[in-house]
């Protein structure tokens, strides 16, 4: 590699090494990466919720977790490739165990000062990530001689237009193609001349203001109470029975909502929809469930009003008990989900149809929640009548379902008692 090329490459900025957890207000910026037809190939995501310049291992984890498992994940990135900036500290983070490698590209900075021992250690971590299936992206600093061992790991190399003179574009592109099989992304393209220069060199991907400025997306998320998450973490740590873990999930609608939303998100990479809490726990496994709950705890900020959560839990349990009188056992889970998610619109502060966009639910459950139709709708109506004391609706619906006052009152009392048993460990 020529000294001229090496000297034309700007050193990567040093990531922020400050301490402190991420401050999350749900504000994420995305910038499109497009192909030569200007079709969107993927999005680079930036955390705009922090006032601190740069990013930390904690903010990296929070950004990835919230972007791929948040309520507006599909609106934010859809099924496109996600590019996430990482610190070297964050690359060893357990949060990467929760993400399907095919769903993200990890953007890796070079190391300030280029100490050989750190480059070698960093290369070992990158090799492990590469073997796990993660795609890695680097900026043009990786073309320095010191990083020769990193080059075979590159899936993408970004050439920042402001970092070199126009006459260096062709030598840089040739250098990338000689030493790697990486796709080239022309980054910070701000003029037509820059675009035509790189397109003329058959660069396939582009990013910059010439195509699209970063846009802000503010996601509405619902956070469980921290005490409940602590209880879940404690159960998982003690390798408790799945039934006991399922019981905690069923008692906190925000916790169960987050779990089903996460496990059915594009980032998790499943090809089937998971709609049962028990199934979700079995698919996730204890280790990943612990990682998920721990990350949720670090990004939790209080949760929705307690009264709403309590009402939703009672609804879910009451509908489950009533369904047991009328339906096969496998349908009782769905009845519980209808009840416990029936207040999601209030919890999230958005219409029910928008709230349900972020979670996969069986069609009969959606019918009950969105249209008040189908087999579960009368149970939801009866449950609401129990809350409101509407005697006429209560009587009409009970008669239509052929349920006696005794059956309903017994179920309601048991649901209230069950919902009260939600105290988390101190």
Image (cartoon, helix red, strand yellow):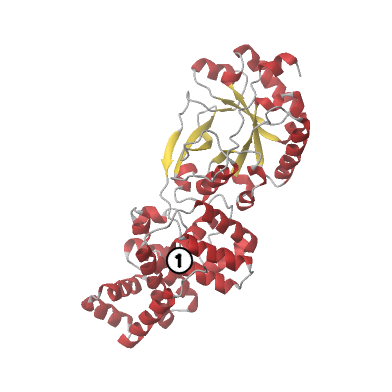
Q: Is residue 110 left or right of residue 196?
A: right
Q: Position of residue 290 (x, y in %)?
A: 60, 60
How many numbered marks does the figure carry? 1
Quadrant of the rendered image containing residue 242 = bottom right
- Give residue 247's position: percent from left, percent from top: 51, 72
Q: Quadrant of residue 174?
A: top right
Name the side, left or right, on which 335 lies relative to 96.
left
Q: In this view of the protein, which residue sits in the foreground, 99 or 63?
A: 63
Residue 18 shows in the view: yes
In the displayed structure, would residue 169 be above or below residue 267? above
- Label 1 sits on a secondary structure element that is loop
Q: Is residue 215 found left or right of 139 in the rendered image?
A: left
Rendered residue at 54%/63% (across/down): 230
- 364 in relation to 386, above or below: above
Q: Position of residue 398 (x, y in %)?
A: 29, 81
In the rendered image, the vertical position of residue 196 relative to residue 138, given as above or below: above
Res. 280 visible in picture: no
Viewer-side residue, 24 vs 138? 24
Height in image: 391 above or below 28? below
Q: Residue at x 54, y 57 (%)?
A: 263
Crowd around label 1: few <14 · some 14–19 · many ≥20 (10 Å)? many
Looking at this view, name the residue that lies furthest to the left.
392
Q: Which residue is at 72% across, 24% downward?
A: 144
User: Where does the image place residue 41, in percent across and percent down from the top left?
Assistant: 54, 35
Tell me the residue that label 1 is attached to: 252
**Which residue is rendered at x = 39% and y = 58% of the image?**
304
Residue 346: image quadrant is: bottom left
Q: Is residue 307 left or right of residue 289?
A: left
The quarter of the image holding the N terminus is top right
């Amino acid at each position: 590699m020529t000294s001229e090329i090496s000297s034309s490459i700007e050193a990567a900025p040093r990531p922020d090494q400050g301490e402190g957890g991420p401050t999350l207000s749900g504000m994420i910026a995305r910038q499109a990466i497009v192909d030569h037809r200007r079709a969107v190939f993927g999005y680079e995501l930036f955390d705009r919720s922090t006032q601190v310049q740069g990013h930390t291992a904690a903010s990296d984890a929070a950004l990835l977790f919230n972007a791929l498992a948040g309520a507006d994940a599909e609106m934010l990135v859809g099924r496109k490739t996600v590019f996430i900036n990482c610190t070297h500290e964050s690359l060893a983070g357990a949060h990467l165990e929760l993400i399907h490698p095919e769903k993200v590209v990890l953007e890796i900075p070079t190391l300030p000062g280029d100490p050989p021992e750190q480059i070698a250690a960093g290369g070992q971590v990158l090799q492990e990530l590469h073997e796990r299936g993660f795609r890695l992206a680097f900026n043009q600093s990786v073309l320095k001689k010191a990083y020769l061992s990193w080059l075979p790991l590159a899936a993408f190399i970004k050439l920042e237009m402001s970092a070199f003179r126009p006459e260096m574009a062709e030598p840089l592109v040739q250098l990338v193609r000689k030493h790697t099989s990486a796709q080239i992304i022309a980054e910070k393209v701000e003029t037509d001349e820059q675009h035509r220069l790189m397109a003329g060199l058959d660069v396939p991907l582009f990013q910059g203001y010439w195509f699209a400025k970063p846009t802000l997306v503010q996601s509405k998320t619902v956070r469980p109470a921290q005490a409940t998450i602590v209880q879940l973490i404690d159960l998982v740590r003690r390798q408790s029975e799945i039934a006991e873990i399922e019981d905690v999930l069923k008692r906190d609608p925000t916790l169960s909502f987050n779990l089903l939303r996460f496990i059915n998100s594009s980032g998790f990479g499943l090809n089937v929809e998971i709609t049962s809490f028990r199934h979700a726990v079995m698919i996730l496994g204890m280790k990943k469930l612990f990682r998920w709950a721990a990350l949720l705890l670090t990004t939790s900020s209080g949760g929705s009003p307690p009264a709403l959560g309590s009402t939703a839990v009672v609804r879910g349990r009451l509908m489950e008990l009533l369904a047991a009188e009328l339906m096969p056992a496998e349908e009782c889970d769905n009845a519980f989900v209808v009840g416990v998610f029936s207040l999601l619109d209030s919890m999230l502060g958005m219409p029910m149809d928008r709230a349900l966009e972020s979670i996969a639910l069986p069609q009969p459950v959606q019918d009950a929640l969105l249209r008040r139709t189908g087999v579960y709708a009368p149970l939801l109506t009866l449950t609401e009548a129990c809350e409101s004391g509407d005697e006429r609706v209560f009587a009409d619906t009970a008669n239509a379902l052929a349920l006696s006052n005794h059956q309903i009152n017994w179920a309601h009392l048991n649901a209230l008692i069950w919902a009260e048993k939600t105290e988390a460990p101190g």
